[in-house]
Each structure stands twice: as structure tokens, then as C-alpha cells.
Amino acid sequence: MPTRRIRTAALVSAALAVALPAAAYVLPTSAILRRVGERRAALGADTFEATGTLEAQGPAAERLTQATGVAAPGARLTAPARILVKVPRRCRLELAPPETPEAERPFVALRDNRLTGPLAEVPAAAALVRAVCALLAVPTAGDASEPYAAALAARGVTVAEATLGRFDGRLAYVVGGRAAEAKPLAWIDKETYQPMRLVSREGPALVDVRLLGWGSATGGDWLPRAIEVLDGDQPRLRFTTEQAAANPKLAEALFGGPAGR
């Protein structure tokens, strides 16, 4: 009998642990996004640069090979890469093989919601820069809730709705609906207000971009340790940060704009 009671109590505890996030108080979306903006504004930086390694597999590796000519043995590509972020809403992912001159590096850049570069035709690469811009390149002067809401709405997220869920072992606000729904959603860490994840459409498919490892020795609070792109449950791209810098000088031409800072 005592054993049965213990089992019953354990089952009840497990059920409560699952139910509590759904029952807990959820901040209004505007308050969530305002605090995300405050967290980013406290960094005191409007440009970021990360150098590291890009790994691609499956169709993404095949498309990258077609677009760049970089070999991908076994449908898996690994190459040095760089991510550049400039507020407001300018982002760039480029492959940086040591033998390739900087001016000839394959890239995809986003500026004014317009993609440019040979990698723009690779859905996983396009999804990565769109997500990075929506989560990390929003202007944060003053109340950033409206700019963040506009950036997420542009990716299809219903910003009027927010729930609680879990991601990567942490409790998170889920903006746009419930975590289990197959629709555009954004995850924000409930404790730190760091952006964690964005699911949005790239063409006909939902693509899942995950920002992992905030507070690492390499990325700190500026940039995550890794950014992963999944198509369904299939991994397509992973960028791993090896070095990061805040406030580097980044020319507009890098993002498809006129020359100059």
C-alpha cells in the first residue's frame, strides 16, 4: 500500500510539473518584448561580429556546394564562416575559406527585408539570417516592444498571443501560440529574456532556428554559442561561434547597401 501511494504521488507530481507552465501567469507580449529590448540595449553595442565554423548537411550541404563550389564529402560541408549583425535589421552570413579573397566570399545578407548574395537561394541560410535579424538586430532605443513585434510579425508570428513552454531545459515565453503548435513561434527565456528560438516559414516549409548557449566564454551575452537550423526535426545548418566582438566597424556594402559605415 505505501508503495502504491508513493507511485501515485510521483505521478501527480509529474502531472503538475507539466501543467504548471500552462497555468502560470504570463506577461503581456508587449512587456516580454520590451524586456528583450532592455536586455539587448544594456549591451551598449549596435554591431556584432562572430567568426566560427558552419556545418551543413543534407539538402543544405548540397545547395551550398552548388552555390559556392566548396566540396561537401558525404553530403556534409564544414567551412570557416562569419556572421555580422548591424542594428537596425542588417545581417550577413558568409563562408570564409582561407584561400578565398574576402571580396569573393559566398554570402547571404539581409537589409531592408531584402536578401542578396549567392547563398540567398539556400533556404536554411536564408532562414538563419532572417531569424538573427528578427531576434538580434532590432533597434532597442526606448521601448523596443513595437519594433520587436513588427519584426516577429513579419516572420508570421501572432504577437498578440503568448504562453509558457520549455526549450533546452529552460522555462520560456512562447510568443505566437502554444509550443506544440506547428506555426510561426518565438521562444524567449523567462528568466534572462534572451531570445532562444524562432520557427517561421521559409518558402512552403516551417524552419526552426535555435540560438543555443547564451553566456558562453566565446559569445557572452552578445551572441549565442551556436545557431542551429532545422527543417522539421532534421538538422540542416549549425554555426558555432569561436570568437565574437561587439561594435566592430561594418561597412554598409557588406549588407547590400552603399559603401561607408
Image (spheres, helix red, strand yellow):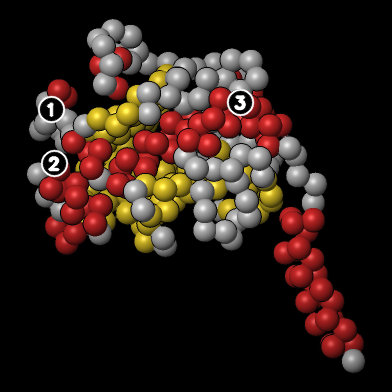
Please state the total of marks drawn on the protein image.
Answer: 3
Give the quadrant of the N terminus: bottom right
Dots 2 and 3: beta carbons under 8 Å? Answer: no
- Residue at the far right: name it: 1
What is the x, y in percent for residue 22? 74, 56
Numbered circle sitting on residue 146: 3
Task: Please tell me which residue is depicted at 83% across the width and 81% down the height of the picture.
Answer: 8
Distance CA(mark 1)–CA(mark 3):
37 Å
Give the quadrant of the C terminus: top left
Distance CA(mark 1)–CA(mark 2):
10 Å
Callout 1: helix, strand or loop? Answer: helix
Q: In the figure, residue 85 lies in which quadrant?
A: top left
Q: Answer few, some or many: residues within 10 Å of disc 1's Cα (few below 14, many 20 plus, some between 14 and 19).
A: few
Answer with mark 1 or mark 2, whichever residue precedes in sequence: 2
In this view, 56 is above or below 159: below
**Towards the viewer: 215 or 211:** 211
Q: Three-letter amino acid code at disc 2?
A: Thr
Callout 3: helix, strand or loop? Answer: helix
What is the x, y in percent for residue 18? 72, 64
Task: Please tell me which residue is depicted at 48% across the width and 48% down the height of the picture.
Answer: 199
Q: Answer few, some or many: residues within 10 Å of disc 2's Cα (few below 14, many 20 plus, some between 14 and 19).
A: some
**Towards the viewer: 30 or 41:** 30
- Pair 2/3: label in front: 3
Callout 2: helix, strand or loop? Answer: helix
Task: Please tell me which residue is depicted at 52% across the width and 58% down the height of the picture.
Answer: 182
The residue that label 2 is drawn on is 68
What is the x, y in percent for residue 154? 48, 35
The residue that label 1 is drawn on is 104
